[in-house]
Image (tube, rainbow, N blue to C red):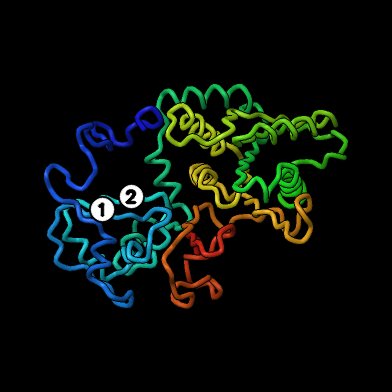
Amino acid sequence: MTHLFSEPVPNSTWLFPEDFRFGNRIYGSKVDDFGSLMKKKNNNYTDPVLVNISSSFLHVNLGYGYDDYDKLFYSNGVQDGLQKVAWLILKSDQYFVPYLFLMSGFRAKLDRMFPDKEAVFHHLGRYLFTPSDQAWGLIARFYDAYLEKADERIGLQIRVLDSKASPTALVLKQVLRCAQKEAQILPPLATKQNETATKAVLVASLSSEFYIELKDMFWKRAIAVGFHQASREEVQRSNDGSHNMMAWVDIYLLSLCDVLVTSGWSTFGYVAQGLGGLRPWILQIPDTKYGGGDTLWGQACRRAVSMEPCFHFPPSYDDNKVGVRVDGSSTVVHCEDVGGGLKLVNL
């Protein structure tokens, strides 16, 4: 990650030395796996505890695909045992902060650290994710050339998770309905150009199709809305350094926009909205079961209740205990785009 980010803390580093290797043993010490230990020590999930931990290193998997024993990490009884572990090696691709606010051992401290529940990721992200000089050069040059002089900057982040269920033509209809009718951030295609304000639209997508189609639609009708795309990688290559650089540039440029339209379930969009302090319009996954592949049913997008990301895969919970904010008493609610997900809001 050294080519993507600058170190957040002066005169220190957040990177381990090159000879540090995560494995079954670290510097000669055994590394226990949290999920395996819980499976051995607990026959049920009702009152889990973690005792008699002798290892100095404990690995915890909280990423996509983790099982019910891994999820016992979120039990208050287990947390007491984890205090005895010197090194906790936690791996996750999930934003699990919302669930920490539901745990009695963390809630009081988190309330003091983050009085504004809707700005937790905003503060953490702005502190930790500082672009490297190389990344900032790419960001600044694109922004200065295409976005700076516009009166309004609009970010469209389009991520297609299933191209068969969401063909390009259908997604394009959805983006236009959202931007023109529901969010009302783009003028109708039938309009006569009479606005003096200029709009610059940043299209962030692996594909160039959406950028080309949108640009041609508005250009042919002499509507003065400029469309721009910083990258068009076509396919995702997560372990490619140059690909990750362009993804980071796109995310940061989106965060500099005045208004965002993002794709549901997309962590790419979550990071952009969090860094920018923006409540996006979230594109819903198209429902085509009634009308076939070219018909858009239901709402195209909906406004996010907060700029916080969604925790996609929380452990099972009791709705009455967690709260869906039906009574206005909980700061944790269900996500707009992920039915079983959780996110933070202010009361």
Q: Quadrant of residue 297?
A: bottom right
- On residue 59, the disc is 1
**314 or 116, which is in the foreground?**
314
Question: Residue drawn 59% across and 59% down?
Answer: 336
User: Where does label 2 land, which residue?
Assistant: 91
- 129 relative position to 188: left or right: left
Question: Residue drawn 46% across and 26% down?
Answer: 242
Give the secondary structure at mark 2: strand
- The crowd level at tag 2 (other Cα within 10 Å; few <14, some 14-19, many 20+) is few
Q: CA distance from mark 1 to mark 2?
A: 8 Å
- 207 relative position to 78: left or right: right
Question: Residue drawn 71% across and 53% down?
Answer: 300
Q: Amino acid at mark 1?
A: His
Give the secondary structure at mark 1: strand
Against 205, residue 135 (above or below) is above
- 265 relative position to 285: left or right: left
Res. 239 in view: yes
**174 or 121, which is in the foreground?**
174
